[in-house]
């Protein structure tokens, strides 16, 4: 087993690469498995659930939803901020825009948009030196209000 010193400390770019890989998996641009991105004990908070859930359960459900026939997915990430909080732990924060469109069996189209999504993902190196998500919080916010206004 390697120690963190032998593996090298996490760099901000290491984390940004993993965030981009996470989204590439979600958008089906790579064939990696989403559940492999997470630590076995990871917890996830999303805007749809009232409490956290196991990342393993969420990843299986999310992968199934994303691979449904007749659906198209798009996402745009803004700059990814990275805080290194230890030799093997880092926090990624960023905003994103996400669009999913699915054609129903009756031919109607259903769309889901997160135009002001926010993400926080905490990464930690596992015993093998692989960066894994140990905690994730994704949420969708409202459009920012314009300052000022009429009187």
Image (spheres, rainbow, N blue to C red):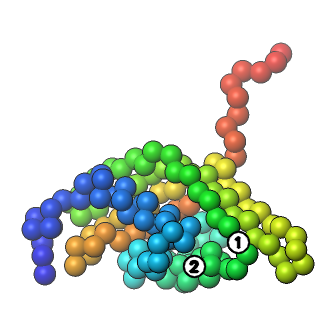
Left or right side of 141 for 35: left
In percent of width and height, residue 141 lies at: 65, 50
Which of labels 1 and 2 is toward the front? 1
**Within 10 Å of the Cα at label 2, are there few (<14), some (14-19), or many (20+) other Cα atoms?**
some
Residue drawn at 28 percent across, 73 percent down: 130
Q: Residue at point 69% right, 42% down?
A: 143
Is the C-beta separation of discs 1 and 2 under 8 Å? no
Q: Quadrant of the N terminus?
A: bottom left
Residue that badge 2 annotates: 63
Quarter of the image where the C terminus is located: top right
Task: Find disc 1 in the rendering and name its residue.
Answer: 71
- Foreground: 113 or 121? 113
Residue 85 percent coordinates (x, y): 28, 54
Residue pictured at 37% horizontal, 55% vertical: 16
Q: Work out which residue is located at the far left of the displayed protein and give it.
A: 6
Residue 103 appears in the picture as rendered: yes
Total marks shown come to 2
Q: Secondary structure at mark 2?
A: helix
Q: Does the image show residue 26?
A: no
Q: Earlier in the sequence, mark 1 or mark 2?
A: 2
Find residue 3 and report its image quarter. bottom left
Residue 96: give its label: none
Q: Marks 1 and 2, Cα distance to the nearest angstrom? A: 12 Å
Residue 102 x/y as whole percent: 75, 70
């Amino acid at each position: 087993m390697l120690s963190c010193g032998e593996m090298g400390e996490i760099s901000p770019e290491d984390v940004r690469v993993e965030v981009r890989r996470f989204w590439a998996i979600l958008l089906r641009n790579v064939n990696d498995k989403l559940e492999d991105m997470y630590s076995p004990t990871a917890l996830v908070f999303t805007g749809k659930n009232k409490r956290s859930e196991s990342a393993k359960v969420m990843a299986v459900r999310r992968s199934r939803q994303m691979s449904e026939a007749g659906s198209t997915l798009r996402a745009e990430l803004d700059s990814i901020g990275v805080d290194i909080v230890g030799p093997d732990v880092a926090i990624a924060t960023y905003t994103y825009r996400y669009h999913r469109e699915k054609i129903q069996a009756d031919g109607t189209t259903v769309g889901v948009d997160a135009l002001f999504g926010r993400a926080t993902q905490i990464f930690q190196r596992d015993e093998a030196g692989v960066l894994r998500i140990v905690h994730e919080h994704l949420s969708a916010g409202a459009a920012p209000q314009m300052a000022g206004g009429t009187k």
